[in-house]
Image: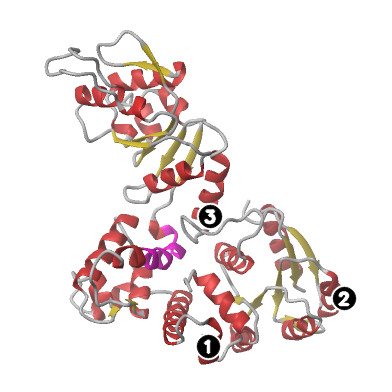
């Protein structure tokens, strides 16, 4: 639960909206104090230990702006997330300039609302800094892996090609107690069955023609680390039985060997196919499916976690630019918007490849949509097919403006805040929310 052990103050006079928000917040693990008027809120907030305040702009006996200002005067600086109608957006923007953290406009999607709330809360006792992404799905995956690292049960990671299944498994490996042993990755679809058996389990000298020396397989070389079997759905039926025996007995035999070799590693499997369908058709053993699926972690495609796109772009830029000569200083706002609107059929792998190509070929300071999507005729063509939402465009533009201000200020946040005419606390909140490195 993303909001476990978090304390949330809700100021909302609408009983239907208020009840709905309380139920969802409590479902996410939060403890909620609900006040229905400005008077109640001003009485309770000064002594409240709330981690964040969700406040409607319009209240029956005042406004959310009154509550924010009077609460701030007491010295208690709760992060505020305002709920506003379209007619009050200018007021919400003014409040953000004064130090409020964010706002959502009615009507809003609950997933968007929870994303905004989680971003203003920042890392807490149960919430680590983002390593896999900013989206709720990847934050949940990160929290799940932190728990999964404490046990040795087999794990099945599922998702489309290119979503980062090996990346999350390597993160799991990094979380394990040291020394954790090596990380051994095997692509089950890359080798023919006979060669795959030898590579996975090893072989003795003379086991077959050409076996001139003993060979240790991946299962043995993994030691106390992780054996990662990618594309497990393509494993040959003969090897499925041997893998099942390895899991059940925690041992295996090299090809041509008589002595049982202990299997000490943790097994993690991954697939981009529907294993349940393969089980139903007889292409995959049912008993093996249940043994590798003790723990399961689905990774959604990049098109379903838009909050990760810009975050990943910046990280790929940092990693790739360090290893090549490039004129590019970063991404233009239009590039962020175009990337956020792209469907990414190749997922994270496609995103990284496009950024690497753009860095290699870019001839100006800022990477444009045309650098990321050269197959499209022009920026106009990109814009015609993009269609970002207003929220996406706003965040992309804010990100570009803040990065530019930080560059001009020599990465000095206080000077950048002066340039942007906002308070330092507001700029810090924006930097954290947008995942900008200072």
Quadrant of res 263? top left
Residue 249 point in image, percent of width and height: 45, 16
| Magenta segment boundaries in residue numbering | 304-315
- Residue at which label 2 appears: 43
**How packed is label 2: few (under 14 Cα within 10 Å), some, or many (20 or more)?**
few
Check residue 280 for magenta coloring.
no
Mark 2 or mark 1, whichever is nearer to me? 1
Residue 243 point in image, percent of width and height: 36, 22
**How packed is label 3: few (under 14 Cα within 10 Å), some, or many (20 or more)?**
some
Q: Residue 415 carries which label?
A: 1
Residue 198 point in image, percent of width and height: 24, 22
Check residue 307 for magenta coloring.
yes
Along the line of sight, the residue nearer the viewer: 261 or 384: 261
| Residue 34 falls left or right of residue 129 | right
The tag earlier along the polypeptide, 2 or 3, is 2
- The kind of secondary structure element at disc 3 is helix
**How packed is label 1: few (under 14 Cα within 10 Å), some, or many (20 or more)?**
some
Relative to residue 112, is residue 243 depicted above or below? above
Mark 2 or mark 3, whichever is nearer to me? 3
| Residue 35 falls left or right of residue 436 | right
* Gap between marks 2 and 3 measured at Cα: 35 Å
- Residue at which label 3 appears: 139
């Amino acid at each position: 639960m993303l909001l476990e052990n978090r304390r949330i103050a809700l100021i909302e006079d609408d009983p239907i909206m208020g009840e709905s928000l309380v139920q969802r917040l409590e479902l996410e693990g939060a403890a909620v104090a609900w006040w229905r008027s400005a008077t109640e809120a001003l009485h309770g907030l000064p002594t409240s230990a709330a981690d964040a305040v969700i406040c409607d702009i319009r209240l029956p006996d005042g406004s959310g702006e009154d509550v924010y200002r009077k609460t701030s005067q007491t010295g208690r600086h709760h992060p505020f997330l305002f709920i506003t109608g379209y007619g009050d957006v200018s007021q919400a923007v003014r409040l953000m300039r004064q130090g409020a953290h964010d706002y959502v406009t009615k009507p809003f999607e609950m997933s968007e609302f929870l994303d905004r709330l989680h971003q203003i809360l920042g890392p807490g006792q149960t919430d680590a800094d983002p390593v896999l992404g900013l989206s709720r799905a990847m934050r949940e995956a990160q929290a799940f892996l932190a728990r999964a690292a404490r046990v040795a049960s087999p794990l099945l990671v599922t998702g489309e090609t290119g979503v980062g299944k090996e990346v999350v498994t390597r993160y799991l490996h990094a979380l394990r107690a040291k020394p954790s042993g090596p990380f051994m990755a095997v692509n089950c679809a890359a080798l023919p069955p006979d060669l795959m058996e030898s590579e996975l389990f090893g072989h003795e000298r003379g086991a077959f023609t050409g076996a001139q020396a003993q060979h240790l397989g991946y299962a043995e070389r993994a030691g106390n680390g992780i054996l990662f079997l990618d594309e497990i759905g393509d494993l040959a039926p003969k090897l499925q039985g041997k893998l099942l025996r390895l899991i059940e007995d925690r041992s295996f035999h090299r090809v041509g060997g008589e002595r049982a070799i202990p299997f000490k590693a943790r097994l993690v499997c991954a697939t981009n196919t529907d294993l349940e369908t393969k089980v139903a058709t007889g292409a995959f053993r049912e008993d093996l499916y249940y043994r590798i699926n003790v723990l399961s972690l689905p990774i959604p495609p990049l098109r379903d976690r838009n909050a990760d796109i810009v975050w990943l772009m910046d990280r790929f830029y940092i990693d790739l630019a360090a290893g090549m000569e490039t004129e590019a200083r970063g991404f233009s706002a239009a590039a962020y918007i175009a990337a956020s609107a792209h469907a990414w059929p190749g997922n994270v792998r496609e995103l990284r490849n496009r950024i690497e190509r753009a860095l290699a070929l870019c001839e100006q300071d800022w990477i444009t949509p045309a650098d990321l999507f050269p197959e499209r005729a022009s920026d106009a063509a990109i814009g015609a097919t993009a269609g970002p939402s207003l929220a996406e465009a706003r965040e992309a533009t804010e990100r570009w403006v803040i990065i530019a201000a930080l560059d001009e200020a020599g990465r000095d946040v206080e000077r950048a805040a002066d340039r942007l005419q906002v308070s330092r606390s507001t700029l810090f909140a924006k930097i954290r929310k947008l995942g900008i490195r200072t």
